Image: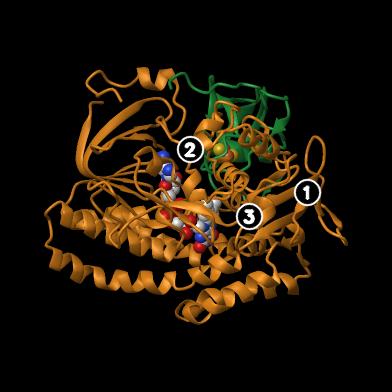
């Protein structure tokens, strides 16, 4: 879906759905997922439709992923860190626990 | 960590917030600047310091307007300001307490004054197929380019109108993207409506020249710029495969990445949550909190600067930030009204000059009717997959406004809390009831502004007041 035209910067290895991939420090998790060709970041709770990042700035919530064991994080707002474990989410409706 | 206190909390480290924070600090106030991004810069100058450090050649690619942001970031670094990057503000109370979280732990800061500089978001562009993977906003592609040097694979199509549409097309083209088409919704009628504002825009004619140069550059590179006044639909089942232009001669352009842009609108979640006074921008169809020239709002301790108070662009945002910093310095008793007004003069002039282009742009690039009130089958609430038709039906069944709609549908109740469907719902309901958007009103926004996990709240210290 996306490719890096320049990989200057420090590299880190992250894990997306069990697969190790390289990413560059400063990138968001959502960017790294798009570059890994992983396609959709989640499926919707209503119809199960695949969704991918839409805004990349924290507005649309299409990028909700499980990051290091915490579900429903906005992958576009979290930077990659070494060894980070990222999982695609299927159809979670509620976010957080507080209201 | 315990509860913290300072004179001013500034929310947002874009041009407005950075300049506001530096100005307030220079006037002797203790300032905490909070931004949910991990780096300073806001939307326009996103990642500018890191780009300058790690891939300086990209500064040329992204253009002088982008590179200019480096100076404001340096000013910020040099000032005596507490900066909290990677912290999302999720509640602001009227007494000036600001709650934020870094994703693992929440905390609160109590301030005598709050300057909100949380900027704009791109207007959501509900067209058939816009929820498919492969479809994103033009700004999203630009964010990937700025912050991660990423370029879309395969053919790219852009649709919409306005300065950001052409800018992103041009930046991506220079970055090596395979751009197949730019489909614009601007009509001859828009040009007629904009014409009376041409003279007033002359002080800011550099923006006009820039627009013309972008268009010329794209055309010279062989990118077709075509008209799509009736809108588009996106083809594909599991992901986007093409952009279809609606109309008699409608063609379909193959595309794996489709980028949508219909202008930007103020980010009003926090200003609504604070119940500030808002007004409706008739030409650009958005809400904005009303402010005076120093950014003062209907609450004495809350100021707003930058595109969050109405879209005037980055240069005006920086000037507005300085004005808000001066406004707060006066309100805090650090400078006299006369000193404030004297220091404000150059920034008022800068703001006026930069803002001179806006009436022209606002009328030349209005969001088209097919985006404001989409066809029945088009999804407007992405979170809950609710269509424009369902909102119309609810209006017919008696829902008078956005808040009552929630008794019929879950629109606005998903994770984005109405950021994506809010403006569409107002527009569709206004049309259905034959009323103006101002009469229809907006979603009532309640904290938290962004969903919080229980773990984040639990990690909050005992001596922090509960929201
Ligand atoms: C995606 C996008 C791309 C753009 N690109 C350009 C461009 O290339 N050229 C141009 O001239 N204009 C661009 N604009 C227009 C933009 O609005 C600029 O005019 C300028 O960035 C506005 O400056 P600002 O300081 O008002 O807000 P911004 O630069 O938007 O800064 C606001 C800051 O507030 C932060 N924030 C928001 N809410 C919260 C919260 N709850 N908690 C913590 N922090 C928060 C954001 O992370 C952001 O850093 C773009 C707009 C968008 C939305
Ligand atoms: S992509 Fe929109 S919130 Fe992350």
Secondary structure at badge 1 equals strand
Residue at label 2? B443
Could you say which is closer to the camera, residue B290 or residue B439? B439
Q: Nearer the viewer, residue A4 or B464?
A: B464
Identity of the residue drawn at 73% across and 41% down: B376
Residue B365 shown left or right of residue B389 in the figure:
left
Asked if badges 1 and 2 are on one and the same chain, I answer yes
Residue B105 to residue B390: above or below? above
Q: Is residue B426 among what the camera can see? A: yes
* Chain assignment, label 1: B
> Looking at the picture, does residue B406 appear above or below residue B86?
above
Q: Earlier in the sequence, mark 1 or mark 3?
A: 1
User: Which secondary structure lies at badge 2?
Assistant: loop
Q: Earlier in the sequence, mark 1 or mark 2?
A: 1
Residue placed under numbered mark 1 in the picture: B233
| Mark 1 residue CB less than 8 A from any atom of ligand 2 | no
Visible in this render: residue B44? no
Residue A98, compared with residue B357, is above or below; it is above
The chain coloured green is A
Q: Disc 1 vs disc 2: Cβ atoms closer than 8 Å?
A: no
Q: Chain of mark 3?
A: B
Q: Given contact means CB atoms under 8 Å apart, are the residues at marks 1 and 3 in contact? A: no
Which chain appears orange?
Answer: B
Q: Please give the residue where the numbered disc 3 appears in the rendered image.
A: B261
């Amino acid at each position: 879906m996306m490719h890096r035209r320049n990989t200057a910067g420090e590299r880190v290895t992250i894990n997306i759905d069990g697969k190790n991939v390289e990413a560059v420090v400063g990138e968001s998790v959502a960017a790294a997922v798009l570059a890994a060709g992983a396609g959709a970041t989640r499926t919707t709770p209503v119809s199960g439709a695949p969704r991918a990042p839409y805004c990349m700035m924290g507005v649309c919530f299409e990028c909700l992923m499980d990051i290091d064991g915490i579900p429903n994080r906005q992958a576009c707002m979290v930077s990659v860190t070494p060894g980070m474990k990222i999982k695609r989410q299927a159809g979670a409706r509620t976010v957080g626990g507080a209201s | 960590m315990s509860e913290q206190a300072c004179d001013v909390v500034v929310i947002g480290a874009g041009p407005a917030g950075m300049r506001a924070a530096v100005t307030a600090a220079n006037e002797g106030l203790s300032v905490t600047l909070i931004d949910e991004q991990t780096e300073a810069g806001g939307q326009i100058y996103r990642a500018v310091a890191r780009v300058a450090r790690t891939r300086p050649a990209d500064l040329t690619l992204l253009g002088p307007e982008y590179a200019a942001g480096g100076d404001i970031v340096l000013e910020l670094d040099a000032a005596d300001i507490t900066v909290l990057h990677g912290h999302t503000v999720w509640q602001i109370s009227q007494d000036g307490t600001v709650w934020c979280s870094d994703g693992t732990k929440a905390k609160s800061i109590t301030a005598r004054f709050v300057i909100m500089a949380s900027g704009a978001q791109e207007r959501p562009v509900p067209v058939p197929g816009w929820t498919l993977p492969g479809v994103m906003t033009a700004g999203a592609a630009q964010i990937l380019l700025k912050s991660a040097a990423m370029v879309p694979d395969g053919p790219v199509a852009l649709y919409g109108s306005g300065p950001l549409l052409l800018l992103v097309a041009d930046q991506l083209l220079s970055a090596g993207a395979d751009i197949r088409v730019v489909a614009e919704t601007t009509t001859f009628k828009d040009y007629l409506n904009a014409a009376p504002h041409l003279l007033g825009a002359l002080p800011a004619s550099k923006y006009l020249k820039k627009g013309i140069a972008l268009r010329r550059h794209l055309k010279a590179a062989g990118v077709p710029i075509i008209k799509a006044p009736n809108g588009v639909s996106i083809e594909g089942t599991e992901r986007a495969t093409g952009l279809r232009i609606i109309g008699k001669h409608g063609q379909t352009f193959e595309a794996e990445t489709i980028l949508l842009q219909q202008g930007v609108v103020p980010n009003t979640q926090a200003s609504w949550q604070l119940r500030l006074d808002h007004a409706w921008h008739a030409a650009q169809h958005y809400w904005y909190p009303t402010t005076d020239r120093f950014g003062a709002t209907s609450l004495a301790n809350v100021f707003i600067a930058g595109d969050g108070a109405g879209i005037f662009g980055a240069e005006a945002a920086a000037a507005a930030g300085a004005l808000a910093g001066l406004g707060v310095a006066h309100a805090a008793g650090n400078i006299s009204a006369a000193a404030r007004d004297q220091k404000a003069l150059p920034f008022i002039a800068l703001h006026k000059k930069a803002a001179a282009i806006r009436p022209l742009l606002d009328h030349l690039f209005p969001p088209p009717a097919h985006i404001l009130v989409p066809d029945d089958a088009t999804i407007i609430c992405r979170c809950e997959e609710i269509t424009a038709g369902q909102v119309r039906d609810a209006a017919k069944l008696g829902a008078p406004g956005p808040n009552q709609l929630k008794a019929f549908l879950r629109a606005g109740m998903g994770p984005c809390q109405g950021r994506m469907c809010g403006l569409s719902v107002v527009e569709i309901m206004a049309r259905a009831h034959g009323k103006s958007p101002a009469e229809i009103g907006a979603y009532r926004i309640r904290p938290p502004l962004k969903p919080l996990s229980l773990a984040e709240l639990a990690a909050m210290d005992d001596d922090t007041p509960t929201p």
